[in-house]
Image: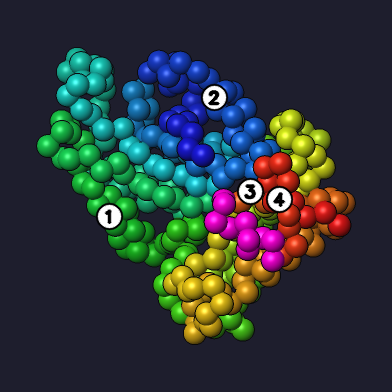
């Protein structure tokens, strides 16, 4: 689920007239997490009233605030368009778009701070450059930032930057990692299989609701741990086909689910729920799950 957070600075939120508060965003994130949904936040640097330094501080709030900590992120720098109200403020000298160089430096500073459990889906919105009056017009901003990180000898460890994608893997060389963190009243476990080069072959997001998790009113989730996402990379193969080094269909998904079940059981949860699309329900049935009212459920 995509939530347009834009900024976590209450002063900026009020200044540009968003209409709701950061607390509303925080509450929405907690409810979605408790319902087992994957959370994608949309964050915007260079808003009216922001500075390069305030954006650095604002970005840190995404990870420092346990009420947020999204699974995925879209970074959309504010872009100045002729029809926007911001255009008038720019003409009056009340707003200054960052230059492309400033934006590249800012994002290169921020990307290495992104936790390993988060995936950065996009870094710029692809708006035709002819529509943009001032500031960055490059749609290749992600590649520009990656080039700057390489020049600095740094790297980003977000999910997208570590995916094996279509590369072959040697399953015997994979390591099972478990990264735990608190978020929205729950303890989250990011379980992943990684190569010796720290490339991601697959991962699962396990959520263990705590006493401060909001109530969802969903019977399937009563007293249940939740797998909010299961993803294995590599080339897709028909069900039953043999793998020849591809990450998919090598049993990684089964192993991740078994680890999630073991962690949940050790923490005293008697039920494991999975949010599953129609096309994946048979997969979970093979793992011993059955369909509840809404979720796939596995009881002892």
| Contact check, label 4 and label 1, Cβ < 8 Å | no
Q: In this rendering, is residue 268 above or below 132?
A: below
Span shown in magenta: 277-286
Q: CA distance from mark 4 to mark 1?
A: 46 Å
State which mark lies toward you, 2 or 3: 3
Q: Secondary structure at mark 1?
A: helix
Instruction: Provide residue 247's location: percent of width, then percent of height.
Output: 52, 74
Q: CA distance from mark 3 to mark 1?
A: 36 Å
Assign the magenta stretch its main secondary structure: helix
Q: Mark 3 or mark 1: name the one nearer the start of the chain.
A: 1
Q: Mark 2 or mark 3: name the one nearer the start of the chain.
A: 2
Q: Which residue is mark 3?
A: 275
Q: Mark 4 or mark 1: name the one nearer the start of the chain.
A: 1
Q: Mark 2 or mark 4: name the one nearer the start of the chain.
A: 2
Residue 55 seen in the figure: no
Task: Give neighbour class at mark 3: few <14, some 14-19, many 20+ (Cα, 10 Å).
Answer: many
Q: Mark 3 or mark 4: name the one nearer the start of the chain.
A: 3
Residue 291's mark? Answer: 4
Instruction: Provide residue 54's location: percent of width, then percent of height.
Output: 43, 31
Q: Which residue is mark 2?
A: 22
**In which quadrant of the rendered image does the C terminus lie?**
bottom right
Instruction: Provide residue 108's location: percent of width, then percent of height.
Output: 37, 51
Residue 291 seen in the figure: yes
> On the rendered structure, is 74 left or right of 40?
left
> On the rendered structure, is 37 left or right of 271?
left
Q: Which residue is mark 1?
A: 144
Q: In this rendering, is residue 251 above or below 184?
A: below
Q: CA distance from mark 3 to mark 4?
A: 10 Å
């Amino acid at each position: 689920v995509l939530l347009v957070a834009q900024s976590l600075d209450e002063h900026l939120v009020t200044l540009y007239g968003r209409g709701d508060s950061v607390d509303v965003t925080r509450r929405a994130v907690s409810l979605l997490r408790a319902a087992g949904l994957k959370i994608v936040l949309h964050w915007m640097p260079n808003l009216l009233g922001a500075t390069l330094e305030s954006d650095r501080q604002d970005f840190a709030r995404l990870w420092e605030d346990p009420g947020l900590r999204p699974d995925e992120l879209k970074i959309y720098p504010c872009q100045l368009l002729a029809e926007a109200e911001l255009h008038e403020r720019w003409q009056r000298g009340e707003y200054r778009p960052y230059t492309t160089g400033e934006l590249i430096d800012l994002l290169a500073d921020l990307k290495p701070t992104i936790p390993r459990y988060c995936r950065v889906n996009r870094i710029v919105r692809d708006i035709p450059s002819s529509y943009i009056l001032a500031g960055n017009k490059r749609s290749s901003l992600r590649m520009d930032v990656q080039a700057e990180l390489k020049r600095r000898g740094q790297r980003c460890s977000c999910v997208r930057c570590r995916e094996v994608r279509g590369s072959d893997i040697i399953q015997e060389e994979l390591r099972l990692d478990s990264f735990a963190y608190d978020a929205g009243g729950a303890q989250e476990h990011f379980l992943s299989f990684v190569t010796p080069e720290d490339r991601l072959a697959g991962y699962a997001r396990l959520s263990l609701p705590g006493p401060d998790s909001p109530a969802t009113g969903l019977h399937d989730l009563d007293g249940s741990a939740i797998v909010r996402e299961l993803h294995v990379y590599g080339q897709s193969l028909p069900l039953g086909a043999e793998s020849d080094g591809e990450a998919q269909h090598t049993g990684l998904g089964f192993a991740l689910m078994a680890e999630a079940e073991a962690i949940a059981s050790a923490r005293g949860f008697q039920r494991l729920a999975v949010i599953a699309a129609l096309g994946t329900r048979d997969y979970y049935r093979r793992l011993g799950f059955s369909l509840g009212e809404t979720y796939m459920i596995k009881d002892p």
